[in-house]
Image (cartoon, rainbow, N blue to C red):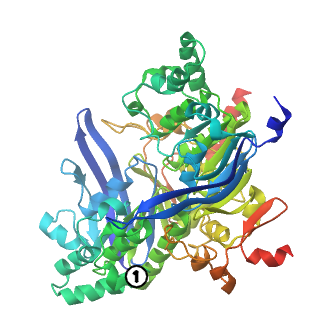
Amino acid sequence: MKDAEIIAPALETDNVSCVFNVSQGFMKGTKPLRAINGVSLQVPKGEVVGLVGESGCGKSTLANVLLGLQAPTTGDVRYSGTSAAGFSRKDVARRIQPIFQDPYSSLNPTKTIRSIVSQPLRIHNVGDPSEWDAKVDEMLDIVGLPSRSANNYPSQMSGGQRQRVAIARALIMRPEIVICDEPTSALDVSVQSQILNLLQDLKDELGLTYLLISHNLAVVEHLADRVAVMYLGRIVEEGPADKVFANPRHPYTKALLESVLTPDPKLGVPETHLGAVFPNPIDPPSGCSFHPRCVACMDICKSKAPRPISSEGHMAECHLMEGDAQ
Amino acid sequence: MSETVLEVENLTVDIPIASGMLHPVRGISFSVQKGETLCIVGESGCGKSLTSLAMMGLLPKTAQRRTDKLLFRGEEIGDLPERQMSKLRGGAMSMIFQEPMTSLNPAYTIGDQLMEAFRRHVTRDRAVARDRAVYLLEKVGISSAASRLSQYPHQLSGGLRQRVMIAMALMCEPELIIADEPTTALDVTIQAQILHLLAELQDEFDMGLILITHDLGVVARIADKVQVMYAGRTVEEGPVNAIFEEPAHPYTQGLLRCIPVPGKTKRGERLGSVPGIVPNLVGDLEGCMFRNRCPHATAECDTAGEQLAKLSSGDHAHACIRSLADRAAIDASSTKAAE
């Protein structure tokens, strides 16, 4: 391995933007929708980076770009320092694999578990086909499923078992990076903790790198080393998880943290003062895109977009930070 | 808290299926006072949604419901014919469903849907119904309410649709609202707002609220009383503080250990879990249904009843045959034996 590969983050986006042209109706032409707007994110090797934000903020589009399922309009995605521009879908799939939210719809109901888990091996034609069965058994064992379940169909399994199958399928190619898109939100509480424990164990055993996309901040805080907060296609705050959770800098991160319902009966339901209306991404607000919902909104926020300001590896994009930075 | 809005005693639901009789709800009792919030907690398949449908008389046709008592405002409604039941539903007792995307009719404007129940239960007068709809939409925090009435559900976001559902449930000034997972499909920020709103409105209108959820965070913040369900039975019930501070049943204890709590569980630390799966509830059932997942189970549990036993602190009761101290003693002796 070259030195550059050791130092470079496992996954990196450099000023990636993704613009869709959305039809405004019959004969009305199209308008650009900036689903991702200049995102630079680094996922260091062996770490867990949490990505949080409300629905519609561009989390899933970013995941698609990282998985090579969606070409960025501008910007570059790099895997261990190598630009993905020349990569084929297969090259990307060997390095990075997804685990999706809903194990009820992400597994083909007409295929057996063995067929589902071994499919990546067949597609990439890895090794000797006679070894595939053994590899599947080994993978099922790693994710905590009995090898007899290999001949079952997804409909014969519970939600937690299905999510384990999805994890086995993602890991059988031994990827470097796994993108977990809401891996536990479709599961029951008692099953959630088992899957979270499994993800943690697999990371330690196999040296995986995770990008954990979730709106459950308690889960993110539990697993993540770093956290990135996304709002309307931009990363508005990014830093080490303990710093972001203990001392959030962006008002949006503060509001998100306040809305986490910890099981403490002494506290009531929080009032976030956010308002319900998520702005229309086709027609984003002027200046800082968060200003219509911000409790600390100033005049400058309405006209001028804030620039990213970092100190001690903790970045936030907010005009409130300007004073502190000087 | 004075007046009892709803009192349910020994509610069972049986559904005949191909392999025998399914017993999804097996004897549930509870009551809700005016202005009180009861949370029913449990995992999928524990019978919490069927319990709510049974109270509203909305069970599937094949299901058989039996109760010793089903009192609404002190009157028995268990044997009311469908015609009279439908006078109550949407009027004095109303329901908020989980999925605002599927429970609103996409072919009608939200104005029509808001006013439908009101015009049926209260007055035919369109203008009065319209005023009430606008008033409630404003109440639930929807801006430019009057113009929203002519919009269709697809023109609203998920959070707004759920607010419409809440406004709809409030149209006829109900005395009881049953909310089945009202915030599960929503973002955390919207979830906090919707719960805040529900609590506020409940205070203002002095309603009884039954909230069905699997989210213990929600329960802790909003409940007065908690009922933990497992496999169709209540395994623990009590005031919210008692449940969270001194959980007594092994299932409740297990659930509380499963969730990461910012500030309490350390990062990367292993979470507790409740291994195993929910038992099959078909046919004759005997013993404690939780025994195959319980870390403290012994041979006695195979035949144990599942009656609720009161704990020292008043309203707090649980359905384990052993007390906390007993279980600790058993665990200690079994680890000693293992050594």
Residue pictured at 24% horizontal, 78% vertical: B115
Report x, y in % for residue B133.
30, 83
Figure check: B252 above or below B220 = above
Crowding at dot 1, Cα within 10 Å, few <14 / some 14-19 / many 20+, comes out as some
Figure check: A123 above or below B182 = above
| Closer-to-camera residue (B166/A316) | A316
| Closer-to-camera residue (A231/A261) | A231
Q: Is residue A62 left or right of residue B63?
A: right
Residue pictured at 81% horizontal, 28% vertical: A1
Report x, y in % for residue A6.
82, 36
Report x, y in % for residue A79.
70, 39
Q: Is residue A269 left or right of residue B288?
A: right
Q: In the rendered view of the protein, which quadrant contains the C terminus of chain A? A: bottom right
| Closer-to-camera residue (A27/B64) | A27
Which quadrant of the view contains residue A303?
Answer: bottom right
**Pointer 1 indicates a residue of which chain?**
B
Q: Which amino acid type is shown beneath numbered disc 1?
A: Asp
Figure check: B148 above or below B255 = below
| Closer-to-camera residue (B210/B298) | B210
Residue pictured at 85% horizontal, 34% vertical: A3
Residue pictured at 33% horizontal, 46% vertical: B24
Residue tagged 1 = B206
- The answer to whether residue A140 shows anywhere in this view is yes
Report x, y in % for residue A178.
63, 39
Which quadrant of the view contains residue A234?
Answer: bottom right
- The answer to whether residue A273 shows anywhere in this view is no
